[in-house]
Amino acid sequence: MKEQIRIPTSKVQRATKFVKTGARVGSNYIKHYGKKLFNPDLSRDQLDQDNAEDIYASLSELKGSALKVAQMLSMDKNVLPAPYQSKFSLSQYSAPPLSYPLVVKTFQKHFGKSPDALFDSFSKKAVNAASIGQVHQATLDGKKLAVKIQYPGVADSISSDLKIVRPIAARMFRISTSELEQYIGEVEEKLIEETDYTLELTRSIELTKKSGHIERVTFPKYYPELSTDRILVMDWLDGLHIREWLATGPDQRTRNEIGQALWNFYDHQIHVLKEVHADPHPGNFIITDDNKLGIIDFGCVKVIPHDFYEQYFRLMEHDILDKNYDLEGLFLKLGFLTSDDTHKEKTLFMTIFREMIELLGRPFRNDSFDFGDDEYFNKIYEVGDRVSKMKEVRNSRSARGNRHGLYINRTYFGLYNLLNELKAQVRTGRKKLKAA
């Protein structure tokens, strides 16, 4: 993959790049509708493919928050058409890397020396590159290390980038303005945290220590003396990313064991620690050579407020769908309904969210669950697609849901999808949670 020798860092440079991309997308629409005049049955497939390639090429050059949002949207199969999912998912660990001279410049700024002077060896080419930073392999005193380096200007451009992304996302991905504002606000807060490698270092050390007892899970050791707010150094974990590992054809028993480790890790963080690794994409997990689940990158951590936790996880209880349960009252507390809703709106959204929690809560209401059941996932996507196309939902006057639920929902959606890829059968049952 071709290396990038510079990143646009000023607001003007980045805004100009967005404008040029918008012009290309506009041109794609003109070409599409021109062809449609002569072929009314022409589908949007080529249009979506062209737009996905143009937008991804631009976001890859800009790096940072815009590319991160694309990555997040690619994980939600109910939001993006397939071409966008496929292209944007590359940002998880296959974005164009930064050239070595820019890497050296970063080290000179933070340590006053080049990486070659700091480590016994240092790979000049990035091993993988994502939306906010890229990883190089190094050695020091006989230890193999992973060195994560943040792209220049990423932290300073978050707010301005997201202001530009707002109208583009609302128009292209059919997200209501009210929902988008709530979504982007929470994303902005998390992205600012993600660009603070000092905070990530602290959280990584604390969370791995508190989760070290979980069977078949392993974590790298972190090195504060080699890390800064823009450089993070940890042990290198030898192994394969989940999709690479699955390509080797592991047996069902091993896939179940990895799936159980993944479930137990999230179960412990959410229900015991009340703070969770909220970025469950495939690039953040390594299957080690001895078939353990290696978990890396604690940049995105969601701290779960107590009141929200008590209310949200009532949705997973066995009795939540009983006719005698005050589901309307709980929906009001969580923001699924508002006090200003008309009778028609209340009936509509009660029906929608009741169907959703029945589906998404099934794994919690069983002692075990087969995440390899594609029929179950097809139903989730069918419901999500149907709801996303409803005018009443897109034109809702209010955002539906709680801002704290955005990353929890994303976490579970990512977890479910990883378990589906593993085709894992997992023990999921929990003791009854305290009522809200």
Image: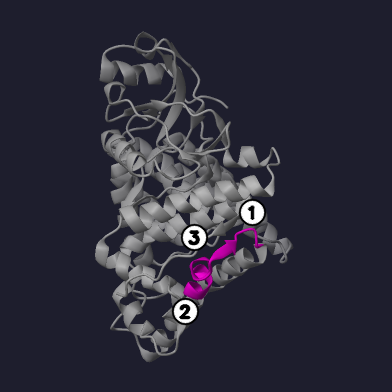
Which mark is first along the chain, 1 or 2?
A: 2
Inspect the magenta stretch and tell me whether residue 46 lies in it.
Answer: no
* Residue 315 image offset from top left, x and y in percent: 41, 73
Task: Give the amino acid at mark 1.
Answer: Lys
- The picture places residue 270, in percent across and down from the top left corner, at 37, 56
Secondary element type, mark 2: helix
User: Dot 3 lies on which element?
Assistant: loop
Q: Nearer the viewer, residue 147 or 220?
A: 220
Q: Residue at x 50, y 20 (%)?
A: 125
As measured in the structure, the alpha-carbon distance from the residue carrying label 3 to the one carrying label 1 is 29 Å
| Disc 2 + disc 3, Cβ < 8 Å | no
Q: Which residue position is annotated with label 3?
A: 173
Residue type at mark 3 is Phe
The residue at the point 64 percent across, 54 percent down is 423
- Magenta region, residue range: 356-373
> Residue 423: which numbered mark, if any?
1
Q: Which residue is mark 2?
A: 354
